[in-house]
Amino acid sequence: MTVKEPILELKDVHTYYGNIHALKGISCAIPSGDIACLIGANGAGKSTTLLTIFGVQRAKRGEILFKGYPIHHLRPEQVAAKGISQTPEGRQIFPRMTTLENLEMGAYLRNDKAEVADDMEWVFDLFPVLKDRTRQLGGTLSGGEQQMLAIGRALMSRPELLLLDEPSLGLAPKLVEKIFETILEINKMGVTIFLVEQNAHMALSISNSGYVMETGRIVLTDRAARLLENEKVKKAYLGE
Amino acid sequence: MDNASFIIQQLINAIFLGSIYSLIALGYTMVYGIIELINFAHGELFTAGAFIGIIVLAALQNMGFVETHFVLTLILVFGMAMAYVAVLGVAIEHVAYKPLRKASRLAAILSALGMSIFLSNGMMLSQGVSDRAYPAIFGLKGFSILDARIAYGQIFIIILSLVLMVALNMFVNWTKLGKAMRATAQNQTMARMLGIDIDRTIRVTFMIGPALGAAAGVMVGMYYGSVRFDMGFIYMIKAFAAAILGGIGSIPGAVLGGIIIGGVEVLWSAFLPSEWKDVTTFVVLILVLYLRPSGILGEHVSESRV
């Protein structure tokens, strides 16, 4: 792996849902500027990992470091203020707010109005269809549009690290491709991306590094290109 | 009185009563929208507003202030009642609801009922059990359209309600804090992940809702000329029905529900024995719960789609 400074580091993180031990000691380090992906079956704990990073779920043990500072004791609104944003599972669009308002909420913590307006133009450049939907309520958008809006909203905070939970879920193949192209484009702007995906092939093909998760543990860590060639990964996740 | 006058008269009555119910219903619906709790203490907050109004108004009247500064008097009476009850609302949220935010729904409801009983008894002890007369600052002055008598007090109350509702609408739709409040109501976890301090948005909701209820309390006191510690109960029931009818959680729904409940009540009183007018509210409530539990503008369907 690269020797770049990790922007995000998890050290032996444990998370519980009541008595259920959902994360059983997750450790990973994501270099600044990379795309890293977390793949694995349903229920392996991928979404829980992202929610734990954000403080929505509390890590019971272990450490989470963002740019070297511990964030595992922070509440979600404080994590957001550090420069992390997330498009969570299910997109979580505000259904009775317009596209424009959803995007504005993404920039809630910012006061630099002019630059927020620039970033909104950037989001509209990335996803032109949103520009035609500005006055439409979030709840009435199609699944694909909601996914684009969720990513756009996450970008509006101008994050250093973007956590994406299953951006391809439920989308037509053509749209999936478009979303992944856009993820690469966002990454080129300097945003580090941590991607959770079931579509392992797509995810690994755009990532620098990959993590394979099984029942609350990371069982395999390698460069994404090598995971694509790994026999076990091929068999279990790439359907080859 | 000819037909046209009769219709005008009843229409004004309906709008008047409807705006009062709407103002109270807004408090229910906003609080429900943001923390999914029926704030049973809301009726008492309405009554508290009426009492603060009477205290301020009586003091100003003793000073001879009312005659010389009529408009300023109204601003002071409504302003102080609303401000005081806003603080009370936040205090109640902090003491009775916030600690139970993660507890079961039932625990929070019981806490709300307890708060209602506590406030009601507090007002009984401090303000007495009998009716208190409200200084009649509008008197019976008014004007006529055809044969319909319209009191200045009624017109003032209708206009003030309208102003408050428009201001609320501007706040929730145009300001950053207002939008953050709606975001919190629609998806708390996501709101937090965007950096919204939901404790703050909930506090603001518990300022605005009760303040609107307090304004309604002062209006009722001024118009009907008296207040009592338990006057909030019947208004609470009607406004609650209005909020459910409009679709609990929906701000336009609360206004619409209030106007309909007020309208039905006035219509009933116009043609049928008025002792039975309160029953109409319950009939409407039962019909709504039976036929369309999500209310006229309730949006549970679209919410579950997302």
Image (cartoon, rainbow, N blue to C red):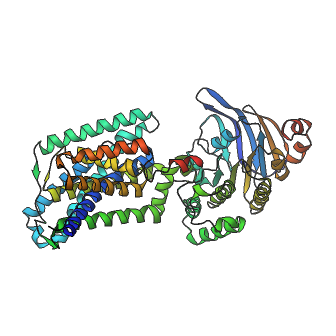
Q: Locate residue A15: give its quadrant.
A: top right
Residue A119 in which image quadrant: bottom right
Between A171 and A11, the one nearer to me in the picture: A171
Task: Single out the residue that lies furthest toward the front.
Answer: B3
Q: Residue at x 70, y 67 (%)?
A: A128
**Would residue B159 be visible to someone looking at this image?**
yes
Which residue is located at x 55 percent, y 45 percent? A75
Find residue B46 and report its horizontal and vertical position in percent: 25, 50
Residue A77 seen: no
Q: Residue at the spot x=64%, y=71% of the render? A: A118
Does residue B129 appear left or right of residue A103 in this picture?
A: left
Instruction: Pinpoint residue B6: horizontal percent, then vertical percent.
Output: 19, 65
| Residue lying at 39% horizontally and 36% vertically, measured from the top left | B108
Question: Residue A169, position in %: x, y?
Answer: 72, 47
Left or right of A227: which side holds B72?
left
Placement of the N terminus of chain B among the 4 image quadrants: bottom left
Q: Quarter of the image holding residue B100?
A: top left
Q: Residue furthest top?
A: A19
